[in-house]
């Protein structure tokens, strides 16, 4: 049975993150967005609050929070601005949680612990100029040379590319093997041949850094390989399950921000002698926002419940991500409609919400991909195999956030 009541701990986490965003982000975000400014010092203050290692086991320097608390963190951060939820997605969801699941103890000590403590900022490099959804067809290569690998290739649309210290990247050791040749590596800023740059001209998320990773004969010692050769695709897919969860939770927060702004405006703005909230078609848009937010939050929490119990949740997380991101776009469109001409101006936040919302129906699997995933599950063309989960540790954590099931081949 799923208990849908948040715990006192969950509520305390949510309250503390909301207070943080109201003090550290919301007073400044309009200016940061307008100027395209990325303020890494805010990431440092997020680390001080324990947000950069929230669901990581305390053994590895994290907060040991459960996945419902983690979802609430993502929701509250995106309620303020998408750029700060993105940090949770790539630093925690795609990178740190993946290392917690797949890395050796020595690798965790070297890379995961400083990430969980916020001493190092991390990102994730899978997408390439010619490879998005077709993640098993990477052009980046990794050639074994003695006790090292030599990596070549380029990654694009990488959040935090120009500010991250550590990079979890994927390259093929044998392109003839397709996805079975993909292998995962941790790279560190400062390695010879590794460079990054920033993409300009984005539609939204102006307060967040997005860029490229260039690998030109980057020599990575074999100890930088995560998992075995050829396991990279499985590692990447398990990472994306975590990333999709953060995106789903965050977009519930974005839709909530649209609703909050629209409710304020519906009370303040008057036409025909009464608040516009009295008009039936405005009520309809507000009601649709409410319904979609509540449904999205429950879908996220269901996936979080499964994660807390170490149960594979690819289907549930995909559905939560698909619903929440599509609904965030529609909520932003309706919020602008409710604001009328004012919604077309950055004097009001809904203009920013619409620009930010569009990215999430593309990254972590397009809405079209998730449509196919859900149809294939319903038709029986796709079925998740039961997989071994990481065992709970003997001691050290009171509230352990169980990792997602270990992918096939590691069972």
Image (tube, grey):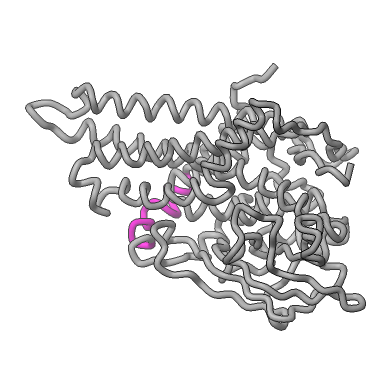
Is 24 one of the magenta-colored residues?
yes
Instruction: Using the image, determine if residue 16 lies above or below residue 99.
Output: above
Residue 401, image quadrant: top right
- x, y percentage for residue 98? 74, 51
Q: Nearer the viewer, residue 80 or 385?
A: 385
Residue at 87% in and 56% down: 104
Quadrant in which the N terminus appears: top right
Residue at 16% in and 28% down: 275
Instruction: Examine the rendering and report whether any part of residue 127 can be seen.
Output: yes
Which residues fall within the magenta stretch?
A: 19-32
Residue sticking out furthest to the front:
176
Is 252 one of the magenta-colored residues?
no
- x, y percentage for residue 118? 66, 59
User: Chief secondary structure of the magenta span?
Assistant: helix
Residue 169, image quadrant: bottom right
Quadrant in which the C terminus appears: top right
């Amino acid at each position: 049975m799923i208990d849908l009541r948040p715990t006192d701990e969950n509520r305390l986490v949510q309250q503390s993150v909301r207070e943080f965003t109201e003090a550290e982000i919301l007073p400044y975000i309009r200016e940061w967005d307008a100027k395209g400014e990325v303020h890494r010092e805010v990431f440092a203050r997020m680390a001080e609050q324990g947000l950069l290692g929230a669901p990581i086991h305390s053994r590895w320097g994290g907060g040991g929070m459960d996945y419902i608390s983690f979802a609430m963190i993502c929701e509250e951060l995106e309620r303020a601005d998408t750029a700060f939820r993105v940090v949770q997605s790539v630093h925690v969801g795609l990178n740190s949680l993946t290392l917690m699941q797949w890395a050796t103890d020595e690798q965790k000590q070297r890379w995961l612990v400083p990430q969980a403590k916020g001493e190092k900022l991390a990102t994730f490099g899978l997408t390439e100029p010619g490879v998005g959804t077709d993640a098993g067809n990477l052009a980046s290569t990794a050639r074994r040379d003695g006790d090292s690998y030599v990596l070549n290739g380029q990654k694009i649309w990488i959040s935090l590319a120009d500010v991250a210290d550590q990079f979890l990247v994927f390259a093929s050791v044998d392109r003839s093997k397709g996805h079975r040749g993909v292998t995962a590596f941790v790279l560190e800023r400062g390695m010879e041949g590794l460079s990054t740059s920033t993409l300009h001209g984005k539609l939204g998320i102006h307060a967040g850094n997005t860029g490229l990773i260039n690998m030109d004969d980057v020599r990575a010692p074999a100890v930088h390989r995560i998992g075995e050769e050829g396991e990279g695709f499985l590692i990447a897919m398990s990472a994306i399950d975590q990333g999709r969860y953060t995106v789903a939770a965050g977009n519930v927060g974005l839709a909530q921000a649209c609703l909050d702004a629209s409710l304020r405006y519906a009370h303040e703005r008057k036409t025909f002698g009464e608040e516009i909230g009295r008009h039936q078609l405005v009520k309809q848009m507000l009601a649709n926002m409410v319904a979609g937010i509540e449904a999205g939050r429950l879908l996220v929490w269901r996936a979080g419940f499964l994660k807390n119990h170490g149960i594979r949740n690819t289907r549930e997380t995909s559905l939560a991500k698909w619903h929440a991101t599509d609904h965030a776009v529609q909520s932003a469109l309706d919020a602008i409609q409710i604001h009328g001409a004012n919604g077309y101006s950055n004097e009001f936040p809904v203009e920013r919400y619409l620009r930010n919302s569009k990215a999430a129906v593309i990254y972590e699997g397009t809405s079209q991909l998730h449509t196919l995933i859900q149809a294939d599950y319903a038709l029986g063309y796709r079925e998740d195999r039961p997989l071994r989960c990481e065992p709970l540790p003997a001691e050290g954590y009171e509230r352990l956030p169980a990792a997602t099931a270990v992918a096939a081949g590691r069972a």
